[in-house]
Image (cartoon, rainbow, N blue to C red):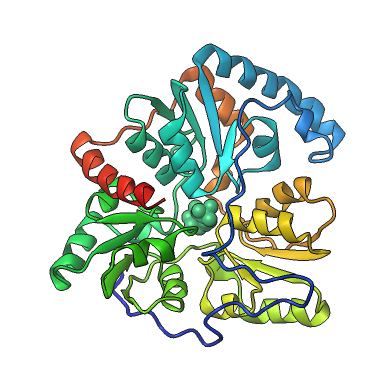
């Protein structure tokens, strides 16, 4: 059954994250800086020291060596989302970041081949922004519950229902949905994109919780959809209140795909790279990253002074990507991502509009 449009509900808590205890300073999604991606090939398995156990490193080293050789032979880069497992993130990725950074990297890389260590909408976005490059996704089943929640036809129906209202679309959507949109956004720039339009009403699809979060920070009226991330919607405010009660000094850092009661408990709300940047800047003694499991593993490597409390919600789609299927993707040059050129042209206009906002 198709979801129905919903108006964002008022959050049952403050409209901005509450300030954490001193000396931390709360940083909101709109002001946090994205972590700079690391560029260039990583030293062979070198970054895995302290990330994976010694015994595993021995198994991983020949795979990493193969991937390194294949990348040189194919003039390929592995672009990895922050949710990749540490062996991928620290062992074989050339470029890494949140969705906005991945889109920018895909548009700017000189490589002939992009292996997207992420989910399908990320690979599709890379292909739309780099149509002349070969984009590979190691497992075509790597989907996303948000992308699955809405179709191009749903957006056409919404536009008929709200004529003239601009459509702001989260990048976690298919090319077909982007093609029906005026502009895309990510979790790191959603508020900025909404306000850049200079209108008093927008359709913001498909994530109801990101829409709610933006609505708490702007006077622009937000009409949303009832999509949700199957990973973030499982966190609860009660779960975080319990953690806070047992450790009042804990820094709670949440992704805006979480429900309002979760964001009300957070000290900081931001995209995955904004979370990483906040931890690096503030170096809390203890922190919980209210997002996908692998984030804490990856951030811990660069923030050894922070102890991470880890309620673990795994994204089954992100976890389809493994270091083994990245090697196979490069060996076999599979699975090549294609987007219908007519759809790609219209989707690209929405992506370019976002990138132009900066
Ligand atoms: P980011 O853009 O914050 O990395 O989020 C992507 C995503 O899929 C979160 O679930
Ligand atoms: Fe989609 Fe959620 Fe997985 Fe991100 S974590 S890819 S939003 S299902």
Q: Is residue 286 above or below residue 21?
A: above
- Which image quadrant is residue 166 in? bottom left
Question: x, y percentage for residue 124?
Answer: 37, 40
Looking at this rendering, what residue extends furthest in the bottom direction?
Answer: 12
Q: Quadrant of the N terminus?
A: bottom left
What percent of the width, then of the height, locates residue 221? 31, 78
264 relative to 221 in the view: left or right: right
Task: Examine the rendered structure and indicate whether residue 283 appears above or below residue 111.
Answer: below
Residue 201 in percent (x, y) is at 27, 74
Residue drawn at (68%, 61%) of the image: 312
The answer to whether residue 293 shows anywhere in this view is no
Q: In which quarter of the image is residue 344?
A: top left
x 78%, y 83%: residue: 245
How many numbered discs sit on the rendered protein? 0
Front residue of 336/252: it is: 252
Q: Which residue lies furthest to the top in this view?
A: 73
Q: Determine whether 97 is above or below 1 in the image.
A: above
């Amino acid at each position: 059954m198709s979801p129905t449009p919903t108006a964002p509900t008022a959050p049952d808590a403050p409209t901005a994250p509450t300030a954490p205890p001193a000396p931390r300073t709360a940083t909101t999604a709109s002001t946090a800086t994205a972590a700079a991606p690391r560029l260039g090939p990583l030293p062979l398995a070198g970054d895995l020291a302290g990330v994976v156990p010694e015994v595993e490193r021995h198994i991983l080293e020949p795979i990493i060596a193969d991937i390194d050789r294949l990348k040189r032979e194919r003039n390929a880069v592995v672009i990895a989302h922050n949710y990749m497992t540490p062996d991928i993130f620290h062992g074989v990725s050339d470029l890494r970041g949140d969705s906005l950074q991945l889109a920018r990297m895909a548009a700017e890389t000189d490589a002939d081949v992009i292996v997207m260590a992420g989910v399908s909408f990320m690979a599709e976005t890379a292909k739309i922004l780099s149509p002349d490059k070969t984009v590979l996704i190691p497992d075509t089943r790597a989907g996303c519950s948000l992308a699955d929640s809405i179709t191009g036809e749903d957006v056409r129906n919404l536009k008929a229902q709200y004529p003239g209202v601009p459509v702001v679309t989260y990048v976690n959507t298919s090319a077909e949905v982007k093609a029906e949109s005026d502009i895309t956004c990510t979790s790191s720039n959603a508020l900025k994109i909404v306000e850049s339009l200079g209108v008093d009403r927008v359709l913001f699809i498909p994530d109801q919780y990101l829409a709610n979060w933006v609505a708490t920070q702007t006077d622009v009226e937000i009409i949303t959809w009832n999509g949700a991330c199957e990973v973030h919607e499982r966190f609860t405010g009660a779960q975080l209140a319990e953690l806070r009660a047992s450790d009042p000094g804990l820094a709670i850092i949440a992704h805006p795909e979480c429900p309002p009661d979760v964001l009300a408990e957070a000290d900081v709300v931001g995209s995955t790279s904004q979370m990483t940047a906040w931890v690096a800047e503030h170096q809390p003694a203890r922190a919980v990253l209210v997002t996908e499991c692998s984030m804490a593993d990856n951030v811990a490597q660069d923030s050894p002074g922070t102890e991470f409390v880890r309620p673990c919600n795994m994204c089954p789609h992100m976890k389809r990507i493994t270091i083994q299927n990245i090697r196979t993707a490069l060996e076999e040059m599979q699975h090549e991502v294609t987007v219908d050129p007519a759809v790609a042209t219209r989707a690209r206009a929405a992506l370019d509009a976002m990138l132009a906002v900066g």
